[in-house]
Amino acid sequence: MSMLISIKPEEYDFFVRINEEKDIVIARQMVKDIAKKLGFSLADITKISTVVSELARNIYRYVGEGFIYIRERKEGKDVYIELVAYDRGPGIEDIDLAITGGFTTTKGSLGLGLSGVRRLMDEFSIKSEVGKGTLVIVAKRRRSF
Amino acid sequence: MQERVVPIIKIYDCLVVPIQIELDDTTVEKIQKQILSEIENNDVKGVIIDVSMVDIIDSYISYTLSETATMARMMGCYTVLCGIQPQVALTLAQMGVNIKGIYYAMNLENALEILAGIEE
Amino acid sequence: MKEQILKNLSNYLELLQERFGHEKIWEELLISVAEYGDSDIYHNSIKESLEKILEVMKIDEVLCALDIITDKIEGFPKEDLLKYIIYIKNEYCLEKENNLREVKEALTELATPIIRIWHDIVLTPLIGTLDSERAQAMAEKLLLFIDANKAKYVILDVTGVPYIDTVVGGFLMEMIKAVRFLGADVVITGIKPDIAHTLVKLGVDFNNIIVKRDLETALKYVINLIEKR
Ligand SMILES: Nc1ncnc2c1ncn2[C@@H]1O[C@H](COP(=O)(O)OP(=O)(O)OP(=O)(O)O)[C@@H](O)[C@H]1O
Ligand SMILES: [Mg+2]
């Protein structure tokens, strides 16, 4: 698992454990409150909560258990919200394919989760190892308009 | 009897479905079942799903909505999604979501207008 | 080192003043180095005096001065000072970047007029080059406006846009899609050949978008639709 753990959980302000379907809703409500407190615009709050909904659902669907970590990050005058989705599931074999819009291994899905997440956020990175797990780290900058 | 998770109101020859609860996956699926069984039991031309109180629509919810519209169409019914919040619209558009086979309306009045305008 | 600096302070200052001026600030720096230079703890007073020097002198002059002092004073922590300088410069760059962004964001506001020209009709003339930041700001503003005014038609006039790259074209398409999710219709006017080319390359489906040659035709079209209702 060592390659995947490039985050330190203790450095995050909040986390939600995902292992039931209702945790998806809990996670997105929680991030909504946090983004609101950090002063993100209503449109960006919605984008950020949608991202958490997608990441949490992937954990629930493809792994069964995992975590969402959330923190505020400052860079100079900029404020970012950073989200991490981490699980020790089966991993993703072909990452490039998984982040391509429209690709899915589930019947009854648009396959727009990961590609959507990438488009909604300012920063996106994903690491995955087959048989070991998946780590998605994303961030969005607070804009002032 | 089908489980009822949302109120469904019949207006003229349309069903109006106001969604005012948090949409988790199970709830969306239940709403789909409920809508389809109401269509079966009522002779209606259209279904208006009012999402003005819904503040997150993600890819799974979009998929289920468009699936519902397709199924409704097979049962002879048109679907209008009404009252999408501006920030939700921006999010869906940026994600690249297409909700196929559905009409969009700003409010109930527009939705009824659209359905009335469809000639069969 | 501390004693050496304090004993010969006036000599050093004379030398520095002669070549570089700003005796007072140099005095401050040398004293804070004497006081705190030995500890390896990052110290604010050293950083502050360096900041003052960097404000009034060019960086290569400062480096030259540091070379001279290092030669004179045994154990002078030149490397530490260099680290401070790099740090200060970095902070300064970040600040400059932020200022630029603020100005840009202020301009964004100005350059995105949204006008309600008729009961149900909103006109958005796009002016100047669009970048993705501006396009996003505009999309947000436009959607809130449509929602608040319950507008049914949006005329997007791109006459004033000289050039659209694929990124911005993508944003425009997203915006049009978002408007349609609200239940409003979009009419585009003023598309130049270049822009048409980009949009076609993006695979834009013009079946769902109404395009009119110029603003007048667009207005006539929309008003006609409204009167028919
Ligand atoms: N945490 C994960 N662990 C293992 N596989 C994953 C994980 N997340 C995504 N995947 C794989 O990547 C594919 C693409 O994911 P994505 O979220 O983009 O679409 P989807 O979940 O299939 O559909 P949608 O999110 O639109 O409902 C999935 O079908 C799945 O095979
Ligand atoms: Mg998914």
Image: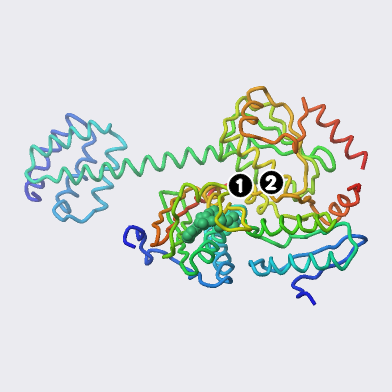
Instruction: Give the farthest residue toward the top.
Output: C193
SS under mark 2? helix
Q: Which mark is residue B94?
A: 1
Residue A40 visible in rendering: no
Residue C221 rendering spot, x and y as whole percentages: 85, 32
Q: Quadrant of ligand 2?
A: bottom right
Asked whether mark 2 and ligand 1 are closer than 8 Å, the reply comes as no
The quarter of the image holding the N terminus of chain A is: bottom left
Instruction: Indicate the chain on which mark 2 is placed.
Output: C
**Which residue does the image show at 11% across and 43% down from the upper left?**
C9
Label 2 sits on residue: C178
**Which residue does the image show at 36% across and 41% down from the upper left?**
C92
The amino acid on which the numbered mark 1 sits, given as a three-letter code, is Gln
Residue C151 visible in rendering: yes
The answer to whether B2 is drawn above or below residue A73 in the figure is below
The amino acid on which the numbered mark 2 sits, given as a three-letter code, is Ala
Q: Which residue is at the front of the view, C174 or B70?
A: B70
Instruction: Give the farthest residue toward the bottom.
Output: B1
Q: Which residue is at the front of the view, B118 or C132?
A: B118
